[in-house]
Image (cartoon, rainbow, N blue to C red):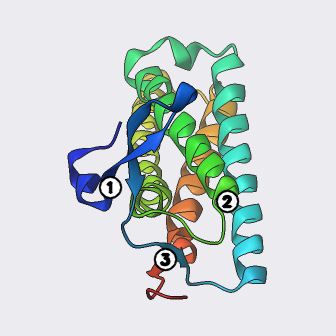
Amino acid sequence: MVSRKYVGDYRLENVPGRGGKLKTVPVYRGPLFRFKAEKQALRASRQRLLMLTCLASAALLVTMLLRAEMLTRIYVVMPLVLSILPTVLLWMGIYNLFTAGDSVRRDQSDRIHNRFAGWSVVLIVLSVFSLIGQITAYLGSGGLSGLPVTVCTVVLLLCGVFIFRRKNDLLMEEIPPGQ
């Protein structure tokens, strides 16, 4: 299934199927893209993004497993629960990044770069909302009993910031026809 944005990159072709019967299939005929970064820089970026995504996932998991009274407040825990979606989608970006070959289709190119750029911003915003809720909880209770939750949330926020800063390492350029 191809989204409407990329439908012009595909052509329908008849190919022989089982038993010699003709079958109509979409074949990609659009431009191909490659990473602008050199091989070594791209490998280092992949490793950094993998490490940051692992760290963000671990911080989120540890936060959810902590037994803290602060996590009983909806305005603290709801942004953290909603952070599961961006984290999973960052993992999908990691998968797309590591399975991308030397040349990728336009939809794959957009998916790789935009997934890290967009979902890291969502992760940052949700972490900030949770931190605001945690500060409110600290002001209301007067104690620092939820400090491990705050530390994990700050780690999650920093991972989101560093992933967002690394998005330009994944920029792609169109491969000229005939190369």
Closer to the chain start, of discs 1 and 2, is 1
User: How far separated are the C-alphas under marks 1 and 2?
Assistant: 31 Å
Closer to the chain start, of discs 3 and 1, is 1
Where is residue 20 shown, x and y percent of the image?
A: 51, 32
Question: Identity of the amino acid at label 1?
Answer: Tyr
Crowd around label 3: few <14 · some 14–19 · many ≥20 (10 Å)? many
Element type at mark 1: strand
Comparing labels 3 and 2, the label whose residue is closer to the camera: 3
User: How far separated are the C-alphas under marks 3 and 1?
Assistant: 20 Å
Question: Does residue 28 appear in this view?
Answer: yes
- Label 3–label 1 contact, CB within 8 A: no
Q: Residue at left 65%, top 72%? A: 102
Question: Identity of the amino acid at label 2?
Answer: Leu
Q: In which quarter of the image is the C terminus?
A: bottom right
Where is residue 50 shown, x and y percent of the image?
A: 72, 54
Residue nearer the viewer, 58 or 21: 21
Q: Residue at left 23%, top 59%? A: 8
Element type at mark 3: strand
Please tell me the numbered disc located at residue 10. 1
Where is residue 148 shown, x and y percent of the image?
A: 70, 32
Residue at the spot of label 2: 49
Please tell me the numbered disc located at residue 172. 3
Element type at mark 2: helix
Q: Is residue 49 left or right of residue 163?
A: right
Where is residue 144 shown, x and y percent of the image?
A: 62, 30
